[in-house]
Amino acid sequence: MLELDSEEKEVFYKFIIVQWQGYNPFKILRQVHETGAGLSGLYEGFDAHLAGRLSYLAVRNTLYYIIYNQVKPAKPYNDLSSREKGVLGAICGAVGAIVSHPFTVISTRQILDGQIPKEWRRNYSSNLSQALGELQASGQTWQGLKANLIRHVLYNLCITIPYDYFKEGFFTRFG
């Protein structure tokens, strides 16, 4: 067994107690308050995130529905395979990601503005249309699009296939 002297035990216990306490909500709220935003800082970027999420879901789901109804077989018991549905979901997710990407960029930057030094802040307006204008004026509207596309393609591919597999399995077993 490993023997520790008193100084090593003190360092070990400090590490265990300080580092592994988990999240302290009071400490997080104190840090948010120290940035000068107060509790409203918790809602920074909410409008942009909501607009981005709604536009993404509207485009992805509508496009999936339209394409699926065009390519599905006429027979009700002969459906597309799980892989075909996964690829279709990935393509529709990519299109939705392209449409919603500017909102994602604005949301991320509005949220992070309160956490960086004041001289580095971009200071986007809380008005969504003004923030879009500021983003377009900066020329960084499509910055990070490749990573966002990869994320949405993989997400939709990895979610659609198991969902369809289990849905078909439950329908077969339970009617």
Image: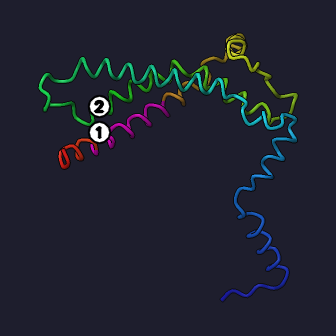
Q: Quadrant of residue 88?
A: top left
Could you tell whether 142 is left or right of 30 in the image?
left
Dot 1: element: helix
Q: Amino acid at mark 2?
A: Lys
Alpha-carbon neighbours of circle 2 within 10 Å: few (<14), some, or many (≥20)? Answer: many
Q: Which residue is mark 1?
A: 164
Q: Nearer the viewer, mark 1 or mark 2?
A: 1
Say above or below: 25 vs 89.
below
Q: Which residue is mark 2?
A: 85
Dot 2: element: helix
Say above or below: 155 vs 123.
below
Overall secondary structure of the magenta section: helix
Question: Residue at coordinates 83% horizontally, 28% vertically from top-left?
Answer: 120
Query: Residue 87's spot in the image, x, y percent?
Result: 32, 30
In depth, the one of 50 and 118 nearer the eye is: 50
40 is within the stretch colored magenta? no
Estimate the spatial distance between the alpha carbons at disc 1 and disc 2, rounded to whole Å.
Answer: 8 Å
Q: Are marks 1 and 2 in contact (CB under 8 Å)?
A: yes
Query: Residue 169's spot in the image, x, y percent?
Result: 22, 46
Q: Amino acid at mark 1?
A: Asp
* Quarter of the image that includes the N terminus: bottom right
Say above or below: 69 vs 80.
above
